[in-house]
Image: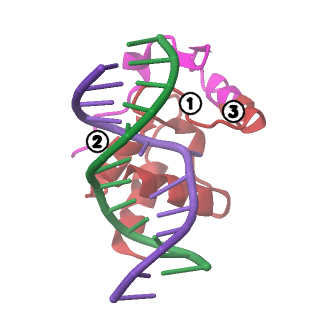
Chain colours: A red, B purple, C green
DNA sequence: ATTTTGACTATGT
DNA sequence: AACATAGCCAAAA
């Protein structure tokens, strides 16, 4: 496993329930701010086997990025189970859910 | 070594 | 707000 992947996994696992991060934020903390698409790859490839909170990762516009309707509904449901309120694919109060304080 | 692959992002219109 | 475009980059093929 490459260092970037390792760091990305560590970061993803630290996103608390009820909070979200963008693909770009995760990539940035993992050391490569413009590798958002790599985060997407990692989620696709490893979310199942590594028990990652894939539903807590959203795009920079503050939307659920998934296009497939079934997966979209699943992601929305998982977030709502964590008290994240969404309407029309957008977060009611994104500010409240953003997980920034991570630099440490 | 080169090409393809994305649940992306910033910018411009 | 919506759309197009170009840039992006690590991993896999």
Work out which residue is located at the far right of the displayed protein and give it. Answer: A70
Separation of marks 2 and 3 at Cα, in angstroms: 27 Å
The structure residue drawn at horizontal position 65% and vertical position 36%, both measured from the top left corner, is A67
Q: Chain of mark 3?
A: A
Chain-order first, disc 2 or disc 3 = 3
Q: Relative to residue A24, is residue A92 depicted above or below?
A: above
Chain-order first, disc 1 or disc 3 = 1
The mark found on residue A82 in the picture is: none
Q: Which residues are magenta?
A: A76-104
- Residue at image mark 1: A64
Image quadrant where residue A10 sits: bottom left
Q: Chain of mark 2?
A: A
The answer to whether residue A31 is left or right of residue A4 is left
The answer to whether residue C2 is left or right of residue A49 is left
Q: Is residue A46 at least partly visible in the picture?
A: no
* Horizontal and vertical percent position of residue A39: 45, 54
Whether the residues at callouts 2 and 3 have beta carbons within 8 Å, the answer is no
**Camera-nearest label, 2 or 1:** 1
- Residue at image mark 3: A72
The structure residue drawn at horizontal position 22% and vertical position 45%, both measured from the top left corner, is A103
The structure residue drawn at horizontal position 44% and vertical position 53%, both measured from the top left corner, is A37
Separation of marks 2 and 1 at Cα, in angstroms: 22 Å
- Of A48 and A66, the residue lying toward us: A66
Label 1: how many Cα within 10 Å (few below 14, some 14–19, many 20+)? many
- Residue at image mark 2: A102
State the quadrant of the N terminus of chain A.
bottom left
């Amino acid at each position: 496993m490459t260092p970037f992947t390792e760091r990305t996994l560590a970061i993803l696992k630290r996103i608390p329930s009820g909070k979200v991060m963008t693909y770009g934020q995760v990539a940035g903390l993992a050391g490569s701010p413009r590798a958002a698409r790599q985060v997407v790859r990692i989620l696709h490839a490893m979310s199942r086997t590594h028990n990652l909170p894939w539903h807590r990762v959203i795009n920079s516009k503050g939307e659920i990025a998934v296009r497939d309707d079934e997966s979209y509904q699943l992601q929305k449901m998982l977030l709502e189970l964590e008290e994240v309120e969404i309407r029309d694919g957008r977060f009611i109060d994104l500010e409240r859910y953003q997980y920034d304080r991570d630099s440490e």
